[in-house]
Image (cartoon, rainbow, N blue to C red):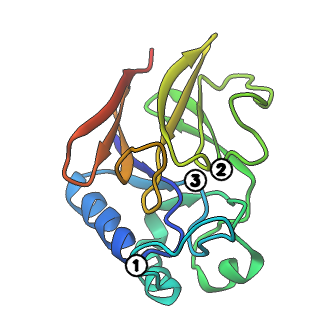
Amino acid sequence: MKYIFASDIHGSAYYCRKLLNVFEHSGAEQLILMGDLLYHGARNDLPEEYGTKDCTQQLNEYAGKIIACRGNCDSEIDQMVLQFPIMSDYNLLNLNGITFFQTHGHLYNPEKLPPMGVCRAFVFGHIHLPVARRQGDVYILNPGSTSIPKGGFPNSYAVLDDNVWTVKDFEGNEIKSMVIE
């Protein structure tokens, strides 16, 4: 099956629309969000077409297809307006026979991994950089930032198609790719 991963929308109605358009046309089963959905954060400039109400409305239209966790910029008030759970610090997801530890990255990260147990992949956001690498027995994955990318990377998201992780920009260009074995 196919899944779309994204992180750090930060209230950009423009990039939220782009992401949901990709999701709608991808044939993906679910949209997996690694937090920082509505608020831009005190350290970030306002993203393009900043509009938390618009972004909320767009995301709520897909509530039944979203799995999300809490980012450091997400709050209880965000949960009050969103119609899908966002307050979990992490989720364990079994996707295509691979167990993922999904988190934002401010509590757990590649330098401070949680006990992975049966998890083969650690997927996070927070750093606004795309990542696809192996660290020991664990795959370290990050879709980059939907609205406020860093490090000279473009705005991005990731696709998990069977066991292939691919980070793409919104023009469909591949940024990083990795087979998860």
Answer few, some or many: residues within 10 Å of disc 2's Cα (few below 14, many 20 plus, some between 14 and 19). many
Query: Mark 3 is on which residue type?
Result: Met
Q: Secondary structure at mark 3?
A: loop
Give the spatial CA distance, label 3 vs label 1: 17 Å
* Residue annotated with mark 2: 104
Q: Quadrant of the C terminus?
A: top left
First in sequence: mark 1 vs mark 2: 1
Q: Nearer the viewer, mark 3 or mark 1?
A: 1
The residue under the point 61% across, 59% down is 35
Mark 3 vs 2: CB contact within 8 A: yes
Relative image position of residue 150 (x, y in whole percent): 49, 49
* Residue annotated with mark 3: 34
Relative image position of residue 32 (x, y in whole percent): 49, 53
Q: Secondary structure at mark 1?
A: helix
Q: Quadrant of the N terminus?
A: top left
Relative image position of residue 180 (x, y in whole percent): 44, 20
Q: Secondary structure at mark 2?
A: loop
* Residue found at the far bottom of this picture: 53
Answer few, some or many: residues within 10 Å of disc 1's Cα (few below 14, many 20 plus, some between 14 and 19). many
Give the spatial CA distance, label 1 vs label 2: 20 Å
* Residue annotated with mark 1: 13
- The correct choice, above or below, for 21 with respect to 31 in the image is below
Q: Is 129 in front, or is 54?
A: 129
The residue under the point 40% across, 78% down is 13
Query: Mark 2 is on which residue type?
Result: His
The residue under the point 26% across, 54% down is 170
